[in-house]
Image: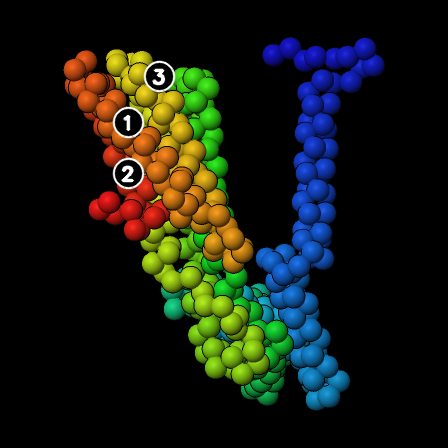
């Protein structure tokens, strides 16, 4: 392998790595800047993260003040430690995590005390207790909190205080920290993840519309080839990531209302506007599937090795006009989900609907003409028309059967 040295004696490979590192640092800096601006701009995921972080710090500080300053406990470290990690994304998860963590801490303290009593030696107690506790931490009942059994054992044995009184102090401090952490999370701006569902629904509809508009532009301009088709297919497949984010947001919103819905309504913390129903998730999921299937069929049609007879360019241009209208409808759907006034849904406009019907008729006539030129052309165009019809039906349920 040849190393490239420039005139100043610098290693070219080192220079390239430094440039990539500098680019990575700049990218991270821009990301931090965007997040900071989003916090100032208004409610959103970034502001939620800031609030949760400040709440966790507040819970730890309160636990320390109560344990060390007010109660004067010499083992006050446990309280802020537990309180800090129990400010979770939802109140329900805080309770579940707290119960699991407290159980793990109890087991770790008891096993460590027993090991110290048997061996009467710090190293021997660690060697006896840690293998058992690390293995036990993998028990599914503990979730991701099982490791606290082993860490508690390390702290207990290393401190040299394993008497019954000391173990009782640690468990009491753990319980105190758990109570404070859960209370802060539940009473101070309780986390509610309802906005994420609406934002992900709207983003999914908008991104589907952007894919359709991009495909429509390619077809109208006659710039459709195998490479372009694969690029549009990859863009459509990325919609699956947004769909996964929507499903995750729906789960978080459902969990964030568990145990807290009554309290949040009394505090007027629940949005007055109803959350979109889960039927909307299914409908947008079908639309995503139609867009992916449509772009996949167009990619096959553009591949000369897989489709010996692609549809006529004039018919594809007409198809592109139809896709542009469907893309506009997707964007209007996004505006509707976000509560925008007068989203201007083209499917509700009679003139636009008439134009769509005209394009649909032209496509059907093209299908009839293609039928005389061989089954391959008929199959490709027929598949495209069917997928456009399915997409139209899910965008405008009243279109079914018309």
Q: Tell me the residue that label 1 is attached to.
A: 363
Q: Is residue 370 above or below residue 244?
A: above
Q: Which mark is residue 55?
A: none
Between label 1 and label 3, give the one nearer the viewer.
1
The front one of 175 and 182 is: 182
The residues bearing labels 2 and 3 have C-alpha atoms spaced at a distance of 20 Å
Upstream in sequence: badge 1 or badge 3: 3
Say which quadrant the C terminus sits in: top left
Q: Tell me the residue that label 3 is attached to.
A: 313
SS state under label 2 = helix
Residue appearing at x 51%, y 79% in the figure: 265
Upstream in sequence: badge 2 or badge 3: 3
The residues bearing labels 1 and 3 have C-alpha atoms spaced at a distance of 12 Å
Q: Is residue 383 above or below residue 184?
A: above
Q: Tell me the residue that label 2 is attached to.
A: 389
Residues under numbered marks 1 and 3 in contact, where contact means CB atoms less than 8 Å apart:
no
Compared across the picture, whether 55 is left or right of 218 comes to right
């Amino acid at each position: 392998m040849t190393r490239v040295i420039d005139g100043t004696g610098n290693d070219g490979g080192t220079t390239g790595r430094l440039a990539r590192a500098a680019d990575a640092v700049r990218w991270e800096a821009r990301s931090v800047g965007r997040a900071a601006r989003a916090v100032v701009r208004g409610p959103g995921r970034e502001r939620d993260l800031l609030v949760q972080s400040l709440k966790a710090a507040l819970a730890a500080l309160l636990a320390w003040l109560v344990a060390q300053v007010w109660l004067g406990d010499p083992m006050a470290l446990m309280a802020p430690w537990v309180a800090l990690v129990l400010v979770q994304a939802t109140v329900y998860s805080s309770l579940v995590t707290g119960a699991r963590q407290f159980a793990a801490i109890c087991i770790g303290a008891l096993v460590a005390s027993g090991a110290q009593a048997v061996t009467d030696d710090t190293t021997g107690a660690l060697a006896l207790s840690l293998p058992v506790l690390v293995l036990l931490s993998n028990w599914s009942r503990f979730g991701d909190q099982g490791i606290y059994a082993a860490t508690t054992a390390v702290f207990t044995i290393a401190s040299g205080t394993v008497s019954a009184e000391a173990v009782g102090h640690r468990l009491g401090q753990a319980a105190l920290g758990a109570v404070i952490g859960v209370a802060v999370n539940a009473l101070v701006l309780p986390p509610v993840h309802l906005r994420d569902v609406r934002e992900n629904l709207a983003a999914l509809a908008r991104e589907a519309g952007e894919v359709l508009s991009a495909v429509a532009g390619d077809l109208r301009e006659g710039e459709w080839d195998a490479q372009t088709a694969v690029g549009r297919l990859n863009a459509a497949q990325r919609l699956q990531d947004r769909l996964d984010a929507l499903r995750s947001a729906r789960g978080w919103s459902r969990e964030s209302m568990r145990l807290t819905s009554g309290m949040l309504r009394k505090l007027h913390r629940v949005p007055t506007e109803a959350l979109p129903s889960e039927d909307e998730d299914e409908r947008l999921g079908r639309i995503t599937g139609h867009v992916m299937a449509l772009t996949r069929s167009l990619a096959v049609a553009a591949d000369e090795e897989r489709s010996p007879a692609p549809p006529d360019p004039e018919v594809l241009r007409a198809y592109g006009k139809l896709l542009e209208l469907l893309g506009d409808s997707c964007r209007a759907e996004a505006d509707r989900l976000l509560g925008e006034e007068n989203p201007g849904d083209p499917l509700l406009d009679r003139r636009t609907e008439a134009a769509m019907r005209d394009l649909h008729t032209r496509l059907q006539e093209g299908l009839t003409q293609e039928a005389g030129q061989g089954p391959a052309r008929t199959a490709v165009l027929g598949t495209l028309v069917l997928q456009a019809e399915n997409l139209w039906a899910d965008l405008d349920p009243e279109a079914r059967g018309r």
